[in-house]
Image (cartoon, rainbow, N blue to C red):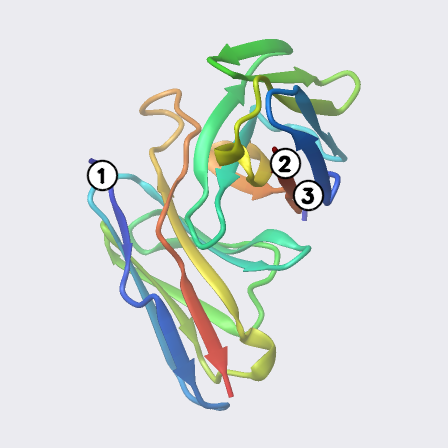
């Protein structure tokens, strides 16, 4: 059974704290993603990685950074958490287009982050 | 970013057919996908259109028309368990995905 695991289901952090959200996939996928989900706004892409140490900005990268030191792990970092970063964060993975013609993304259960 | 428009909410009765539309203002993508998300759950893949036309998977069908910048998800024989949010998504090189704002489907008895 394919799996994307996010380290925490719920997190409460204080304004100004550095926050790490961890995501691990066991499917040997090349691609990994971080989205945030807010009511009425759908899933917005924060960052995307297509290989180890490779990353691309999505639509809303401001205030975030990412790290991909190993293929299976993709971390989202909030350098200095702010209340407007209170949201549901979803990690996903998918195979690369040139490996299989598969456009399916597999999602983790999400981390609900509250910044107070 | 990419722009994918969906109705925010749709209500239908059990056993009926419902169509959820997705219009987009983007180009160069290689396919349109649909995902289902139950409250508190993770989005899960439903259907994918690489080419124009209709793709059928059981009670679910998805349609794409690139010339009209339009696609839809068709759900037949609605069941209560189909109550969820539905997202369209476009994929680009390396499988980079952008999602629409989502449609909340309410199925009533």
Where residue B40 sits, quadrant-wise, is: bottom left
Q: Residues within 10 Å of mark 3 (few under 14, many from 20)?
A: some
Q: Assess disc 2: are there few (<14), some (14-19) or many (≥20) residues with their C-alpha within 10 Å of its C-alpha.
A: some
Q: Which mark is residue B2?
A: 3
**Mark 2 chain:** B
Q: In this figure, which residue is indicated by the disc labeled 1?
A: A27
Q: Can you identify the residue that label 2 sits on?
A: B108
Q: Are marks 3 and 2 in contact (CB under 8 Å)?
A: no
In the rendered image, residue A63, in percent from the top left (x then y), is placed at 54, 74
In the displayed structure, A7 sits above or below A30; it is below
Residue A86 locus on image (x, y percent): 54, 74
Q: CA distance from mark 3 to mark 1?
A: 28 Å
Judge whether residue B109 can be spotted in this image: yes
> Viewer-nearest of labels 1 and 2?
2
Q: Which tag, 3 or 2, sits closer to the chain's start?
A: 3
Viewer-nearest residue: B17 or A116: B17
x, y percent for residue B68: 79, 19
């Amino acid at each position: 059974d394919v799996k994307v695991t996010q380290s925490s289901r719920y997190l409460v952090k204080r304004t100004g704290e550095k926050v790490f959200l961890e995501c691990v996939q066991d499917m040997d996928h090349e691609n990994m993603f971080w989205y945030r989900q807010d009511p009425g706004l759908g899933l917005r892409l924060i960052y995307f990685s297509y290989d180890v140490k490779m990353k691309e900005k999505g639509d809303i990268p401001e205030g975030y950074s990412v790290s991909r030191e190993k293929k299976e792990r993709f971390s989202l970092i909030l350098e200095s958490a702010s209340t407007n970063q209170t949201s549901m964060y979803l990690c996903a993975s998918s195979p690369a287009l040139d490996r299989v013609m598969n456009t399916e993304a597999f999602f983790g259960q999400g981390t609900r982050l509250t910044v107070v | 970013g990419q722009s994918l428009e969906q109705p925010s909410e749709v209500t239908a009765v059990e056993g009926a057919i419902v169509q959820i539309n997705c219009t987009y203002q983007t180009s160069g993508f290689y396919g349109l996908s649909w995902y289902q998300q139950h409250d508190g759950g993770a989005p899960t893949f439903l259907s994918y259109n690489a080419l124009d036309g209709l793709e059928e998977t059981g009670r679910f069908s998805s349609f794409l028309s690139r010339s009209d910048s339009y696609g839809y998800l068709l759900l037949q024989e609605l069941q209560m368990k189909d109550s969820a949010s539905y997202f369209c998504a476009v994929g680009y090189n390396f499988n980079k995905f952008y999602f629409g704002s989502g449609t909340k489907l309410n199925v009533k008895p």
